[in-house]
């Protein structure tokens, strides 16, 4: 005999523009068929859930209280560098990174970290506008802008010396070059610098100093007396340019990036990781053969997002960049 019927929200996925709600609805509370029904529904629903994008964090900078929304490592406990406009018509504010000449970090300082549910893939969407006089670092590297870090490292780890950091940024060469890169300096086998360990050991760095996957060359250099590395994927040409027009650096542009960690099979990291970049909906970087980790890190997941604009050699001029409407998800919606 059926006692009653219930509608239950089994799971909900919410994005900035849409809400999806699945109701199990009309499931009898007491019936000997219930366990079988539940198993069948679970088998049916699980692949659907896994395929849906889930929001891990979002930020519109419409007030000063980022710490209330889980941001931490803020300079002096709070962020105080905002613009008075946002990318959307109803938006009143954005995050502003203002570099004075010679600044390595913006004035006021801009640093913010946010933890999120562990995921082997991360998608980032944000809006950006650079000042008319923006020239970046003046070097073929930097500024750094956005970072993802993993559960292998601590909540406050320095992003340049980890077991994996991935970067989303624009290097400036008469226009903004899209840059996705990775760094895993903490994995470097310092006793075997420059030796190709790719077929010798999984106990090695993947982004340079211990051999490189395929025909790619990872960079290997010394910084602060320590070996460091990086492997970089760039756009062929600038994705935004000085002056007027649709590609103007002084207009808002929507940037999207996606990283998915490579798999591990037969005790080895496989070259099947993904690194993608879009500007205003146009796919510009599209790699599906990236090695982010070796078999030493089978449980590695992304878990931390970090905003930290940084020009290592100091800003060559006074210049600004504005960011707005940051969203991190498990995949591209
Ligand atoms: Ca805003």
Image (spheres, helix red, strand yellow):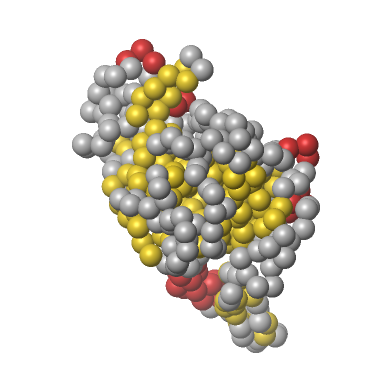
Numbered marks: total? 0
Quarter of the picture containing the N terminus is bottom right
Q: Quarter of the image holding residue 318?
A: top right
Q: Can you say whether 119 is above or below 292 in the image?
A: below
Q: What x and y, as percent, mark residue 67?
A: 76, 48
Q: Can you say whether 136 is above or below 125 in the image?
A: above
Q: Is residue 326 visible?
A: yes
Q: Can you say whether 311 is above or below 307 in the image?
A: above
Q: Is residue 328 visible?
A: no
Q: Quarter of the image holding residue 3?
A: bottom right
Instruction: Tell which of 6 and 145 is nearer to you.
Output: 145
Name the residue furthest left: 215
Instruction: Tell which of 60 and 314 is nearer to you.
Output: 314
* Residue in the image at 60% along x and 55% along y: 323
Q: What x and y, as percent, mark residue 222?
A: 43, 19
Q: Can you say whether 29 is above or below 294 in the image?
A: below
* Residue in the image at 53% along x and 30% along y: 312
Q: What x and y, as percent, mark residue 190?
A: 39, 16
Q: Is 229 on the left-hand or right-hand side of 146?
A: left
* Residue in the image at 23% along x and 28% along y: 199
Q: Is 262 on the left-hand or right-hand side of 56?
A: left
Q: Is 90 on the left-hand or right-hand side of 76?
A: left
Instruction: Tell which of 157 and 168 is nearer to you.
Output: 168
């Amino acid at each position: 005999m059926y006692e009653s019927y219930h509608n239950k929200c089994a799971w909900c996925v919410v994005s900035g523009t849409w809400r999806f709600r699945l109701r199990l609805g009309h499931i009898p509370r007491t019936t000997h068929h219930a366990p079988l029904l539940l198993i069948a529904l679970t088998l049916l629903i699980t692949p659907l859930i896994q395929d849906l994008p889930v929001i891990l964090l979002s930020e519109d900078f419409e007030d000063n209280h980022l710490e209330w929304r889980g941001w931490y490592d803020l300079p002096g406990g709070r962020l105080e560098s905002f613009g008075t406009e946002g990318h959307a018509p109803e938006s009143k504010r954005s995050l502003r990174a203002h570099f004075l000449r010679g600044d390595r970090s913006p004035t006021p300082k801009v640093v913010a970290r946010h933890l999120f549910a562990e995921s082997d893939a991360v998608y980032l969407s944000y809006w950006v506008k650079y000042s008319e006089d923006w020239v970046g670092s003046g070097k073929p590297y930097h500024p750094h802008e956005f970072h993802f870090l993993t559960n292998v490292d601590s909540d406050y780890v320095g992003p340049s010396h980890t077991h994996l950091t991935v970067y989303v940024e624009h290097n400036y060469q008469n226009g903004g070059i899209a840059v996705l890169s990775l760094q895993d300096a903490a994995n470097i086998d310092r006793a075997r610098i420059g030796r190709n360990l790719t077929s010798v050991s999984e106990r090695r760095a993947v982004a340079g100093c211990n051999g490189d996957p395929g025909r790619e060359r990872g960079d290997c250099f010394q910084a602060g007396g320590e070996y460091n590395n990086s492997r970089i994927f760039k756009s062929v040409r600038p994705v935004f340019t000085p002056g007027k027009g649709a590609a103007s650096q002084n207009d808002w542009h929507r940037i999207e990036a996606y990283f998915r960690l490579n798999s591990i099979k037969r005790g080895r990291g496989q070259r099947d990781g993904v690194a993608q970049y879009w500007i205003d909906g146009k796919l510009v970087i599209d790699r599906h053969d990236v090695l982010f980790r070796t078999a030493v890190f089978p449980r590695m997941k992304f878990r931390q997002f970090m905003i930290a604009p940084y020009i290592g050699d100091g800003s060559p001029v006074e210049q600004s960049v504005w960011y707005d409407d940051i969203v991190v998800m498990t995949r591209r919606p």
